[in-house]
Image: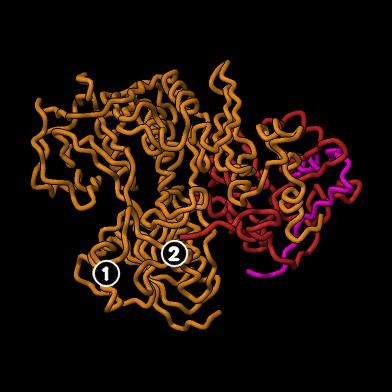
Chain colours: A red, B orange
Amino acid sequence: MEKEMKRIIVHEEHCIACGLCQVHCLVQHSTSRDIIKAFSNERDRVLSRVTLEEDGPISFALQCRQCQEPACLEACISGAMHRDPETGAVVCDEDRCVGCWMCIMVCPAGAIRQNLTGHGIASKCDLCYGSELPACVVHCPNEALTYEEVDDDPPSPEPAGSKAGQGGRS
Amino acid sequence: VNGVPNVKIVIIGNSATAVGAIESIRQHNQRAEIVVVTQESSLIYSRPMLSHYLAGEIDEERLCYRGSDFYTEHGVKAILDSEVVAIEPQEHRIRTRSGEAIRYDKLLICTGGVPIVPPIAGLDPSTPGVFTFTTLADTQGVIEYLRRAGQRPAPQDVADAGNQIGDICEAVVVGGGMIGIKATDALVSRGLHVTMVELAPRILSAGFDEVASDMVSRIFTEGGVDVLTENTVTAVHTESGSETALGPTPAPGGHISAGHIQSGSETHAPEGRISAVTLKDGRTLRCDVLILGIGVRPNARIAEEAGLDVRRGIVVDEYMRTSEPDIYAAGDVAEAYDLVVDMNRTVAIWPNAYRQGAIAGAHMVGVARADQGGVAMNTIEALGVPAMAIGNANAPEGEGYQVLSELHERGDKIARTYRRLVIKDDLLVGAILVGNIERAGIYTGLIRNKIPIGDVLAGPRRQNLMNVNLLSLPDTYRKHVVTGAGIEV
């Protein structure tokens, strides 16, 4: 389980909020994989799994952080959310998802979206399963998104500045 | 890590907690012997998905939470259809109904909850048409009952179901909490007319505030559901004409299972199926099917009898250890730490069950990973409109609580949205979202990690909290979430 896994690294200082990551994420996850067809015919059915945040000079593109202990995985009632045995990525099996939105309720990055096609399914980054590089990374013109092997510890449950753990326990 | 060779772990129960425990044990230890003992007759299924099954959205196969080979793959011996009747801590063994004694080195009790059955005159657990709504057997019972009694099939059963309803069309759901709401939503999907009866002045009163309750209530009412509050069912009538004779007290735990209805083994055979209910306000309503969806209480009887420390649930520490050495408890049956209220309490929700199971499992094979505590939360869907309550979301303004809220209630149900944030000592402690639930987990993260947001509240981004994004939050926290830990700012 503890094999090296690549993650998408966000460099907010390089992001120019061009939105190409979102465009190409949507195309990658469309049926046609054609930018014109995806945007003209499939827009109701496919979402970008990248969220772009922008406020004045600061911007960044964010997708699933691939947490080491994913809250979405423990909250998923259907078993749809799982770790891909090959890539180690946390992915949602859309055939099993029932759209209960538990994952959306617990994802600290807000990186899971509602695809309301049919009964509704959770839509999230799958690291572009089967591709060597995720589409958002490939199409980022300024290297604000990179794909790298990470050997550091996962985000700790008690980030700096947090008051967690300071309270007394019975 | 594999320093605990040949430890024999026995797990009572086979839902989310058991799966969390098994996956965690195997992550650390391949040699431990694992035995699962469960009353269920099927492999692991998802109880929260039963409402989707009842609604006809999914088939039984999709109720599976893990694949049918899960136990085999994880080297688990599963003993199904077996009720544990006693725990003998001194001898380190358990006894089953059939008299079997099973020895353990470590025991995990994850027996979940049992449905609460209210005292109702004439309520005989074996009355056809009366159901609790907790297990697969319950749900199969409802579906089979509706089918046999002539209710039209769910849309997925027949391609062209039409709108014709058979002679089963009136359902009464007792309980306007999570379970009652889910049952109501599912029965509406099946084409029944539902009357939801709630004893409290409003539905969803445990987790949601008045505004959210009213929104959900209105959505149901507009969808044809009769929502009756400050009311309850006081008597049950059957087709034979009168109230059914009071049967013996319900089975231990008050559990009414579909098996009772179909087995024919009951000594007090019902005279006929349910036909009507009388309400507290004196009215009598036609009722073809009655769902008791008040809630569950911890199924802790065997733990109590074994002398474990039990309050409402089995009291556990941050490793899910009970008061008895080598015995752990987790999930709905456990009274574990809640980090929002800063005390131990039972919170019957899936994420807690899985996480606590994983923590117990790790500790049983020598890996100490202390629980940071749970956050009470839940999500429902009212006729297609999602609603969530996270943490202490219902706290009234004042007495140290600051409340931010935003309501849009014009237009049809899809257009209506509501958000309510509860802040105490500069920390977010609760959130309610109705309609638009996008990025709700950011709130959960702020609550769980106890991130001070005083500066945000005092600054120009205050209103951004309503439509939350990470850029509105303190820089250190944003960088932590976006880039990972250990970032110098």
The type of residue carrying mark 2 is: Asp
Most extreme residue toward the front is: B399
**Residue B268 screen position, x and y as percent:** 9, 43
Q: Secondary structure at mark 2?
A: loop
**Residue A27 is a magenta residue:** yes
Q: How many marks?
A: 2
Residue pushed farthest right? A142
Secondary structure under tag 1 reads strand
Q: Real-space Cα distance between discs 1 and 2?
A: 20 Å
Question: Circles 1 and 2: CB distance less than 8 Å?
Answer: no
The residue positioned 46% from the left and 62% from the top of the image is B357
> Measured from the top left, where is residue B345 in percent x and y?
41, 52
Question: Is residue B174 part of the magenta span, yes or no?
Answer: no
Residue at the spot of label 2: B317
Which residue, given by chain and number where applicable, does mark 1 sit on? Answer: B87
In the rendered image, the vertical position of residue B482 relative to residue B329, given as above or below = above
**In the rendered image, residues at marks 1 and 2 fall on the same chain:** yes
Query: Over which residues does the magenta segment extend?
Result: A1-28
